[in-house]
Amino acid sequence: MKRTLTLILCLTLVVAMLFTGCAVKEEAAEVVEKAEEKVEEAVEEAMDTIKIVYIPKNEGNPYFDSIIAGFQEASGELGFEFTTVAPATAEATSQLSFIKAEIQRGVDVIAISPNSSDALNQVFQEAMDAGIKVVIVNSDIPGSEAYRDVAILPMDFNITGIEQVKLMSSLIDGEGEIAILSATTDAPDQNFWIEGMKEALELPEYSGMTLVEVAYGDDQPQKSLTETEALLTKYPDLRGIISPTTVGVAAAAQAVETAQRFPQVQVTGLGTPNQMRRFIEEGVVEAFQLWSPKDEGYLAAYISVGLVEGTIEAAEGNTFDVPNLGANEFLKDNVVITGPPFTFTIDNIGDFNF
């Protein structure tokens, strides 16, 4: 946009000088006036362009790269200005300075996958007080719904935990010791899923499975690898590891592969097809789950633009349509569900590329 404005101004000056040199001042003035009008129109267009920023939990996470791809696709369709920034690590307050910077920049929407369920509430309030829409993507901030406009979940998180336990049960015939490898101790989405797993393990159909430990790899590949190695050493009879984080599930698979503990130790969790493809094809992992993170970003973008333009109102029961995704509905506390989970196996992983 800046380049366009500069070009228009330069052309204005050139034309003005040419006509002045020819002493045709009236025509020169008319050309200059029209050029100035175009400059004003361009400036107004730049000011009217909706600015959306997405702040993932941390850099270099392929899962969040897929969400970014969804925002980018929607940006090409809707014409908003899209940027993304992220901290290097996923500590509870690592996103704080980035949010403050975007408030100062004057964006219209801050979309974020928060690293904490409550540590960012004050700065979210600052954003909302400045007229900025706050859109939580891929999780929520339970109990703090007043500090955001909408939360977009990849699926119904109430069933994520039990779905993971159900899948693990099918892999180990419902018997044996299992462990969980999570992200950070503060991660709101993982913690909610883990509680669901624990509740599921209390059901009669899963009574043959015993949870021996919940480990935390902080969504860092090396630490997740080290934590998995420790689990394999500490529990020689371990039968399964559930890792509801894309970084963790890949690290767990790598550790089990290196230790040659498969198929005795089954690894499952939430991962991306590209990340887990080799482990599936080589038989290290038999099955894992996810949804479409790209669809999450795409949906979040359409909701964000609709909120800013006033074409979408976030209120329980309200419905709206999104291209390629169909009809969507705001649930309680303005939560929107992207879609159901999907189980990837050797039979279908070749159909996906993200």
Image (cartoon, helix red, strand yellow):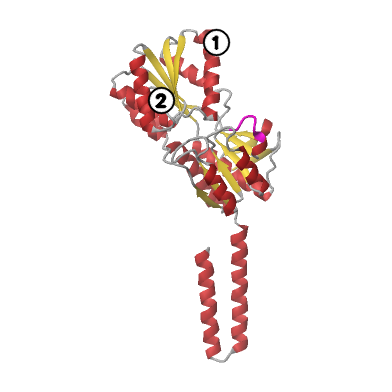
Q: Which quarter of the picture shows residue 250?
A: top left
Circle on res. 345: 2
Q: Position of residue 300 (x, y in %)?
A: 58, 41
Kindly identify which residue carries mark 1: 203
Residue 353 seen in the figure:
yes
Total marks placed: 2
In the image, 146 versus 72, the foreground residue is: 146
Q: Which quarter of the picture shows residue 159?
A: top right
Disc 1 to disc 2: CB gap under 8 Å: no
In the image, 185 versus 344, the foreground residue is: 185
Instruction: Report the residue at 28% width, 24% height from top.
Output: 258
Residue extent of the magenta highlight: 140-145
Of the residues shown, which amino acid type is indicated by label 2? Thr
Indicate yes or no whether the magenta region holds residue 265.
no
Which circle, 1 or 2, is nearer the viewer?
1
Q: Residues within 10 Å of mark 2 (few under 14, many from 20)?
A: some
Judged from the image, the secondary structure of the residue bearing numbered disc 2 is: loop
Indicate yes or no whether the magenta region holds residue 142.
yes
Q: Position of residue 176 (x, y in %)?
A: 41, 10
Of the residues shown, which amino acid type is indicated by label 1? Leu
**Label whose residue precedes the other's in the sequence (1 or 2):** 1
Q: Residues within 10 Å of mark 1 (few under 14, many from 20)?
A: few
